[in-house]
Image (spheres, helix red, strand yellow):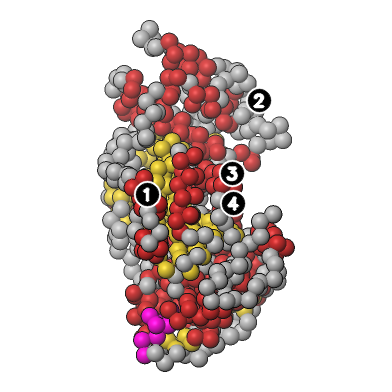
Amino acid sequence: MEQKGGVLMQRYELGRLLGQGTFAKVYHARNIITGMSVAIKITDKDKILKLYEVMASKTKIYFVMEYVKGGELFNKVSKGKLKQDDARRYFQQLISAVDYCHSRGVCHRDLKPENLLLDENGNLKVTDFGLSTLAETKHQDGLLHTTCGTPAYVAPEVINRRGYDGAKADIWGEFKFPNWIAPDLRRLLSKILDPNPKTRISMAKIMESSWFKRGLEKPTITRNEDQELAPLDADGVFGACENGDPIEPAKDSKRCNNLNAFDIISYSSGFDLSGLFEETNRKKEARFTSDKPASIIISKLEEICIRLGLKVKKKDGGLFKLEGSKEGRKGSLGIDAEIFEITPVFHLVELKKSSGDTLEYQKLLKQEVRPALKDIVWNWQGEQPQQLQHGVVQKEEQPSYPGISDVAPPQTA
Amino acid sequence: MGCMNSKSVRKFPAREDSLDLAAETAFTVNEVEALFVLFRSISNSIVNDGLLSKEEFQLAIFKNKKKDNIFANRIFDLFDVKKLGVVDFEDFVRSLNVFHPNASLKDKIAFSFRLYDLHNTGFIERPEVKEMLIALLFESDMKLADDVIETILDKTFVEADLKQDGKIDTEEWETFVKRNPSVLKIMTLPYLRDITISFPSFIFNSTNVERVDETSTRL
């Protein structure tokens, strides 16, 4: 099949050359199906990066990555002094990004203004992980040893060739104090610029400093042009459930989607082929069944949200959006909670992360949400130990009579 | 055509084979190569023969070789196009293709119909659905009374079985699915969009040839 001129792998239309280094060229390109702008880095087969897509031929490797329209922070800085508020916002975003990498065991090892890009909204993006490494590649002494980085910016212990802590090296920065630097900022910078990596400030301590925290009370440090929907009045949503009995059943049935037989069958993990691609414990969804009416499930979720500081928004059917106000590693944590009716007194609830950091979500789910839901959970889906526990507790099921509950309740210890 | 021997199957697929599979599916040549990295690891997990057995398939999905499952069995049976009891790489790619986000709705509807036609009668019949529903309830440790199960089946067949003859044919299924899109959610795997990022080591064996460099140099 003949390939069109300028079309890469039948998928991307190549545009102008954006940059060129010793080992690679970077082109602007457009996905010919979706129209999305991307940057494509073309390198010989000696470097590997993971971004939107990886493509290869016999002699070349292609990395498809986000196109960051605003250019390098270096260009902004080289034109003159930044306002302190702007500098702080860039620094907050940089610390957030590097903290995310460290939480995944990745050390960048080439942090400098040329590798900090700005998108069209002025948000910072970290690029060029060509020198990055994983924590697992440390020597037996727990340190990294390869000498790398750009000479003007590299931390002193990297040059000394005695082995270094990659996470500490990423915090190093060179600076002389002009007299207009504020006192709290001087204190912070002195700790960052400590030549001794053992006493140099840690990531967590940076995030605790008063200078860093200024302005973080706002819902997000990321400027976003999408308008956020005004949250619904949570009391108004949940208050309806506390009205008189005659109204409650109708409200419940309207609020939750009914499952047909095929919906129920499709929840089998045997139909879920994502296990081929992902470790089982990293799934986004958690599901549980409950033998309580929807109103009780909703009240319990509301109670949990109040305690965890999450806002609740009501959506269509039985869908609720739970949103954190604190800034996490990947923006605010968002969880979708959806309630499905199997029978009027038996429901399936699905919890799914919709935004934010996966590790944070799983930690919150494991340490806070699941213990708090204990009263209303019949069992969690896809868990062998839970099944065994029910098996032990379960008594012989009583014969079913008209008017008696269709579901045998679990015995409480 | 002809039988593949185990030696040739273990090697990275030839360029022509990758090109052919890419041409007839939503996958690119590189994505086919990345899928081979996946296929090789799961198909050799128990017996190193370059073919995927039902046991290896279950192990790949559940990470537990002892777990048997009526639904995973059903998917495997549909992947096993040649009815040999094992799946080769070509059939693996062609079958996975129906789960690609870009695969046609028509193909997803047809595959899901065969998935639920448990006894291959050409219809989705009430006893088959009941069998699957009970299997799911057992798998999930849900205890529903018999009359509740019948009520769910009644409600479902009232909506799906338009001719009210106790079984769902392909036309009825298409109508039902278009009114209840959630029934098809298992038919799409978003992971298939990121296959080259999930299995990037294919780049070391890629036999792909492209001519874009010459053109891009002139841009």
Q: Is residue B175 left or right of residue B147?
A: left
- Are both tags, 1 and 4, on one chain? yes
The verdict on residue B161 being magenta is: yes
- The residue mark sitting in front, 1 or 4, is 1
| Amino acid type, callout 1 | Gly
Q: Nearer the viewer, mark 3 or mark 2?
A: 3
**Label 3 neighbour load within 10 Å: few <14, some 14-19, many 20+:** few
Q: Which circle marks residue A374 in the picture?
A: 4
Asked if badges 3 and 4 are on one and the same chain, I answer yes
SS class, disc 1: helix
- Which numbered marker is on residue A367? 3
Mark 2 or mark 4: whose residue is earlier in sequence: 2
Q: Which of pointers 1 and 3 indicates the residue nearer the eye?
A: 1
Question: Measured from the top left, where is residue A196 in percent x and y?
Answer: 60, 18
- Does residue A328 lie above or below A370 as drawn? above
Estimate the spatial distance between the alpha carbons at disc 3 and disc 2, rounded to whole Å. Answer: 40 Å
- Identify the secondary structure beneath mark 3: helix
Q: Residue B43, can we see it?
A: no
User: Which badge, 3 or 4, comes first in the chain's sequence?
Assistant: 3
Discs 3, 2 touching: Cβ within 8 Å: no
Task: Indicate the amino acid at tag 2.
Answer: Arg
Q: Chain of mark 1?
A: A
Pinpoint residue B191: horizontal percent, then vertical percent: 47, 60
User: Which of the marked residues, 1 or 4, is nearer the chain's N terminus?
Assistant: 1
- What is the x, y in percent for residue A167? 57, 31
Q: Please state which amino acid type lies under the numbered disc 4.
A: Lys
Which chain is mark 2 on? A
Circle 1 is placed at which residue position? A239
Q: Nearer the viewer, residue A246 or A293?
A: A246
Which region of the structure is painted magenta?
B156-163
Q: CA distance from mark 3 to mark 4?
A: 12 Å
> Mark 2 = which residue?
A162
